[in-house]
Image: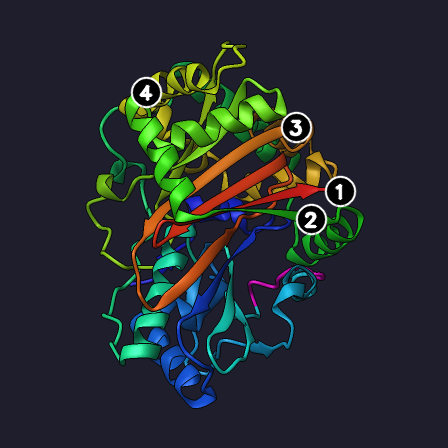
Amino acid sequence: MKQYILTERAHLMCPNMHFGIKAKIAAGYDEGKFHDALRALASAHPFLKSNVAREAKSGKLYYCQHQEIKIPVFEKDNASRWQDDYSDMTRYGWDAFKKCLLKLIVYPDRESFEVIFIAHHLLGDGRSILNLVCEFANCYLSGKTPTLAEESPILSIDELPKGRQLSSVNKLIIGYANRKWKHEGHTVSYEDYRKFETEFIADNPVSYLEEVWEPRKTEEVLRKCHEHGVSLNDYLVAEMMRKEKTNRVVAAVDIRRHLSRYKVGALGNYASATAIEVSNKSEDIWNIARSVSERLKKNISNPGKLMMILACYLYMEPELIDAAAISAIGRFNSSAGKFIGSAILGYKKRNGYSVTNLGNVDNPNIVEAMFIPPASPANVKTMGVLSVNHRLKKCTAHYQ
């Protein structure tokens, strides 16, 4: 069965829709073992041998498998310069119709080596790629073969939980944009998008700020979170609010448990996002965190709010999604595309803040790891958080 691209379409024609997991593997580098582990991953995950293709008659996009596709690997010699290497890998964007959706940078060393898994967002969300890194480390060190896990992208709004329907107002808004798009009769060619993508990346350089919490600090913050009745995620959102002096932060939410067709370990996008808005102007971070916790719980318990962005994508004309970024921040002339890109996705103002916390992974085969988040054009700053063996790392992508 073909795996069609529906909700993932938002990642296809938007610049900087790639992200990374940078990990230190607890063993010396062996080129043969390294490539053996990659082949094992590709056998377990069909998307690693896929790129994007378009059906001739319907025009629908889908993941097309090619047995000859290989994951490109680039050897570098100085892991402290990872930001330059990472930027070089994506300086000219990413041709999802021609290239593998994953590429690796490896820094060989005798005692332990570092590797960066750089993924196009079409391949999966942060947790999907984190799982891929863990499978790689386990295969490399212990020879454990990854289990076959076929991908199951969201194909219909009926797959989302009950109550996921858009509100009447949102349906009217999306319906208006759809009709306007059809009336305009536009189409964004992938060639035009790729030119826009390259120009945007050149004109909008991204920097990454790192912060490390050693296990002792992580444990101390977790203890205080428990005392105040909030989660670490609540604390991280509150921390960004206070630091950036904003009352609105978007948080990613894992929705795997809501999806009946999801197979454990499968690549793909199984996450939503929810905007957390609080009016608490306190300087006490725990006071803000309690307000965040209350709002986040309400949003997550309401399927309409939790699934709203996914439902929007499923109601939108697919080609209209393609036009959102290039119309709002590029030179493509579509009123409908500009409306969606500006009013719904925030590409015009570009003043958003976002946090994605992938949680903690206990894995003796990984010394440490960091989640390098996608630098969404809608955001001023996007923070990725990941703990391995309770050593927490933050990485914040921000436009210079």
Q: Residue at x 49, y 63 (%)?
A: 52
Q: Which mark is residue 244?
A: none
Counting residues from the start of the chain, the first of labels 1 and 4 encountered is 4
Q: CA distance from mark 3 to mark 4?
A: 30 Å
Magenta span dominant secondary structure: loop
Counting residues from the start of the chain, the first of labels 2 and 4 encountered is 2
The 10 Å Cα crowd at callout 3, few under 14, some 14 to 19, many 20 or more, is few
Q: Residue at x 42, y 70 (%)?
A: 25
Tag 2's secondary structure? Answer: strand
Residue 85 vertical placement versus 27 (above, below)? above
Pair 3/2: label in front: 2
Pair 1/4: label in front: 4
Residue 242 vertical placement versus 153 (above, below)? above
Pair 3/4: label in front: 4
Counting residues from the start of the chain, the first of labels 1 and 2 encountered is 2
Q: Which residue is mark 3?
A: 351
Quadrant in the picture for residue 85: bottom right
Q: Which residue is mark 2?
A: 207
